[in-house]
Image (cartoon, helix red, strand yellow):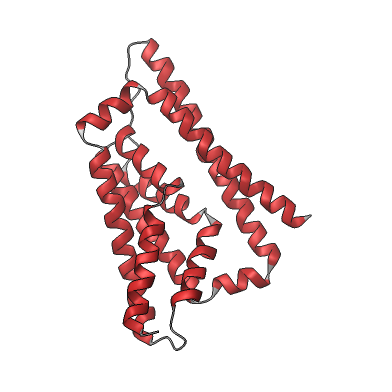
Amino acid sequence: MDPVVSLFSILGALMLGAMSPGPAFLFVTRTSVAVSRRDGLAAAAGMGLGATIICSLALIGVRAVLAQVAWLYLGFKLLGGLYLLYLAWRLWRGAGSVAAARSNGDAGHRTQGPTRTFLLALATQLSNPKAVVVIGGIFAALLPERVPGWMYAAIPPINFAMETCWYAIVALAISSSAPRSIYLRARGWIDRAAGAVLGALGLRLILESARGAG
C-alpha cells in the first residue's frame, strides 16, 4: 500500500474511533455541562494527549507485547476496570450531593479547575486497555509493509490534533445554553445514568480479566 494512502486510511480509522461513544466522550460531555466550558476544553486536551500516548505505544509495538504477555494485559484491564468504577462512584456521589443541595435551595454546581480536569481526562483515556489493542489492530491492518520513518513522526501529533479538535467541538457544542440548561434540570438522573454506564464498563473489564486469569 502506498504510504500516503496508508496514512489517510489510518487517520480516518482513528477519527472514527474517536467519534464513537465511550468513556472519553461521556467524560467530556458531562464535564462541559456540569463544570464549565473551560474545563470541557481542558478535558478535550487530556483526551488528545491520552490518545497520542496510546497511538505512540501501539506504533512501537506494545500491542504485540501485551499479546505475548497475557498477565500484563489482564492486569492492565483490571486497573482500567477499577478506575472506571472509581469514576462511576464519583458520579453517583455527586448526583446525591446535587439532590441534597437542591433541597436546600442550592444548585450544587462546583468547579474543579482545568489542570485537575486535564489529568482526570488523561487518566480516563489511558484507563481503556482495549484502545491499545484496537489502535494496534488498525496499524497492523493499514500500515505499509515497509513503514517510512516520517510516518512514525507524523501519526502521533496528527492524531493528537484530531482527537483534541473533535472533543473541543463536543465541549463547545454541549456547553452552549440550551444543552446546559437541560442538563442542569436533570443533573441528578443524568449523572446516575452516566455512573451506571461507566460502572458497567468497569465491571465488564474486571470480569474479563478474572475469566482470563482463570
State the image quarter where residue 171 is shown.
top left
Residue 19 percent location from the top left of the image: 36, 53
Residue 137 percent location from the top left of the image: 52, 69
Q: What residue sits 61% from the left and 73% below the top?
A: 65
Residue 134 percent location from the top left of the image: 51, 63
Q: What residue sits 39% from the left and 79% below the top?
A: 152
Vertical placement of residue 185 versus 208, above or below: above
Circle count: 0
State the image quarter where residue 113 is shown.
top left
Between 152 and 79, which is closer to the camera in this rendering? 152
Q: What residue sits 52% from the left and 53% below the top?
A: 127
Horizontally, residue 192 falls left or right of residue 37, namely right
State the image quarter where residue 98 is shown.
top left
Between 86 and 182, which is closer to the camera in this rendering? 182
The image quadrant where one finds the C terminus is: bottom right
Horizontally, residue 60 falls left or right of residue 101, namely right
Q: What residue sits 68% from the left and 47% below the top?
A: 207
Residue at the extreme left of the image, as rendered = 177
Horizontally, residue 176 falls left or right of residue 114, namely left
